[in-house]
Image: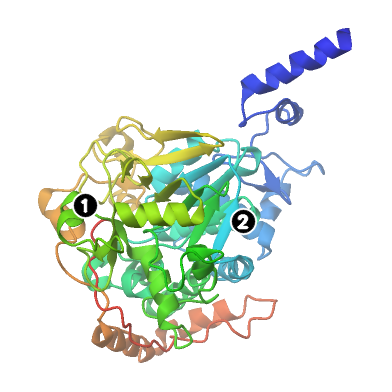
């Protein structure tokens, strides 16, 4: 009897602790004797994770982990960089960081190729929206959600795309998220957004220093920077387009695709997504991509919920779809489209990103569509904007927001005391890496953040000129490129093949306001 009573007490205690902790986890942490973080092969995965010397007792055992080009060493360097980026400025500007990105891309690409175009997972799951190179807000989530490390945090992590452009730390965000994906491939899921396409993240004229291609080339030189940009885009080409949680919640970057076959047939729209090519450029497409499946992929990353005005004026009453204000063939979806999709698939909710909201999370279409935005900067949402995410735990959904008053290790321009010990050169370097946040003037916000009504898509002339310019670049970067080529001890026959041959995009041009 006493044994049965004891088991009941333990079970009750587990229930109160919830899904993010357990008695077993507590025992493991106690056994670590003050060491925080988790490891895959000895690599720290937590934010701020630190480890002492290995069990060999050698005082420099950890230093050895940082040497070499093994997966273990690469992951260790990147996670330590993420823990304290201000202490790793030389690494972030080094050839070693470029080499690590090169190797990391190759390995993550192989992982993504094994995933279907729509992944299926169970709750609990944290769902994140646009990151846009904002390392500070990504650090907020790390500090408060997986502060013990992702592998010690119950549940899955779903990122809805748009990891690059707009923010100043695109390379750092991509490196960290790729490292997490490689470490925990069945726990971390990276979906594709519209900024994970070459037409958008290669649009330097529009985004300037905030464009992904500019940051790659500014950091590593024209030739090596372009090669890394192209390699990372080849990894983006293999990202899944959607996820389904608990067979009930459809997750996507933009929105629901238009049906290209009988939507009531077995599988419906999910089958259409699963049939999208394993390697899809989308904007611009590869030659092997079929037009109808390019449309499916494009709808997934570009579409938006229709506004009330669009519902009245431009949404087709029969289909529930209409033309998006973004232009270029992008669509919006109304109440009818949402109702039809959810009924045909047997789902209850849609979770998507792609549109900026000052509160971090917004609800529309009769509380059936949730929009998640996980960056609080670079979108004209004001100084009080919040970054948000959603925790899905079976029948419960919880919104987690970053308060505007929250401060972490990042330095803000108004914190003059924090800058007093830094030289002008050190301040400049940290501003370029996004580690010092400047309060922009109205003119700067208009220049860098307001997308206005410019369009992206049919910039073939610009692309051809830029890529030709890269091809005709002098030999000044060739030695650096050769050093990158020589680091692989694996089969790299398909690596570093130069600029790809792009075909023109039939989708026309689009505005990039919002996500």
Q: Earlier in the sequence, mark 1 or mark 2?
A: 2
Displayed quadrant of residue 406: top left
Numbered mark located on residue 75 in the image? 2
* Residue 447 in view of the camera: yes
Numbered mark located on residue 315 in the image? none
Q: Give the colour scheme shown.
A: rainbow
Query: Between marks 1 and 2, how big is the CA–CA gap?
Result: 43 Å
Residue occupying image coordinates x 43% and y 58%? 161
Where does label 1 land, which residue?
Answer: 307
Q: Is residue 356 above or below residue 94?
A: above
Q: Position of residue 86 (x, y in %)?
A: 43, 47
| Disc number lying in front (1 or 2) | 1
Front-most of residues 243 and 72: 243
- Circle 2: element type: helix
* Residue 132 in view of the camera: no
Front-most of residues 259 and 9: 259
Q: Position of residue 467 (x, y in %)?
A: 34, 86
């Amino acid at each position: 009897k006493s044994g049965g009573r004891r088991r009941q007490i333990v079970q009750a205690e587990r229930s109160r602790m919830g899904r993010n902790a357990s008695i077993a986890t507590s025992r493991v942490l106690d056994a670590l004797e003050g060491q925080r973080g988790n490891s895959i092969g000895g690599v720290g995965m937590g934010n701020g994770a630190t480890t002492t010397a290995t069990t060999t007792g050698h005082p420099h055992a950890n230093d050895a982990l940082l040497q070499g080009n093994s997966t273990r060493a690469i992951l260790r360097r990147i996670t330590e960089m993420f823990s304290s980026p201000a202490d790793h400025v030389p690494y972030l500007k080094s050839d070693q960081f470029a080499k690590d990105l090169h190797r990391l891309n190759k390995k993550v690409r192989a992982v993504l190729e094994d995933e279907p175009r729509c992944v299926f997972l169970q709750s609990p799951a944290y769902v994140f929206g646009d990151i846009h190179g904002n390392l500070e807000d990504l650090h907020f989530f790390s500090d408060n959600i997986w502060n013990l490390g992702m592998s010690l945090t119950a549940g899955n992590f779903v990122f809805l795309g748009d990891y690059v452009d707009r923010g100043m730390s695109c390379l750092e965000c991509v490196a960290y998220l790729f490292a997490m994906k490689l470490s925990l491939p069945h726990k971390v899921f990276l979906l594709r957004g519209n900024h994970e396409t070459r037409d958008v993240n290669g649009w330097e004229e529009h985004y300037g220093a905030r464009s992904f291609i500019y940051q790659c080339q500014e950091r590593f030189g024209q030739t090596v920077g372009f090669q890394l940009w192209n390699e990372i885009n080849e990894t983006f080409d293999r990202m899944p387009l959607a996820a389904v949680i608990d067979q009930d919640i459809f997750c996507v970057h933009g929105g629901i695709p238009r049906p290209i076959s009988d939507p009531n047939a077995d599988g419906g729209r999910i089958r259409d997504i699963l049939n999208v090519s394993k390697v899809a450029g989308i904007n611009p497409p590869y030659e092997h991509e079929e037009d109808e499946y390019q449309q499916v992929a494009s709808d997934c990353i570009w579409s938006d919920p229709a506004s009330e005005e669009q519902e009245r004026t431009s949404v087709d009453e029969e289909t529930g779809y209409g033309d998006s204000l973004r232009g270029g063939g992008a669509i919006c979806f109304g109440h009818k489209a949402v109702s039809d999709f959810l009924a045909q698939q047997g789902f209850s909710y849609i979770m998507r990103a792609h549109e900026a909201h000052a509160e971090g999370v917004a609800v529309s279409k009769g509380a059936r569509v949730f929009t998640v935005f996980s960056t609080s900067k670079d979108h004209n949402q004001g100084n009080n904007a919040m970054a948000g995410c959603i925790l899905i735990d079976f029948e419960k959904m919880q919104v987690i927001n970053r308060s505007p008053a929250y401060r972490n290790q990042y330095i803000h321009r108004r914190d003059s005391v924090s800058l007093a010990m830094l030289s002008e050169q050190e301040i400049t370097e940290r501003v370029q890496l996004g580690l010092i946040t400047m309060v922009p003037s109205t003119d700067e916000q208009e220049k860098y953040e307001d997308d206005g009504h410019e369009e992206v898509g049919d910039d073939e002339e610009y692309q051809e000129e830029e890529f030709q310019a890269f091809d005709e670049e002098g030999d000044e970067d060739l030695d650096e490129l050769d050093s990158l080529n020589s680091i692989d001890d694996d089969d790299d026959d398909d690596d570093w093949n130069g600029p790809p041959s792009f075909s023109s995009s039939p989708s026309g041009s689009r505005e990039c306001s919002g996500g």
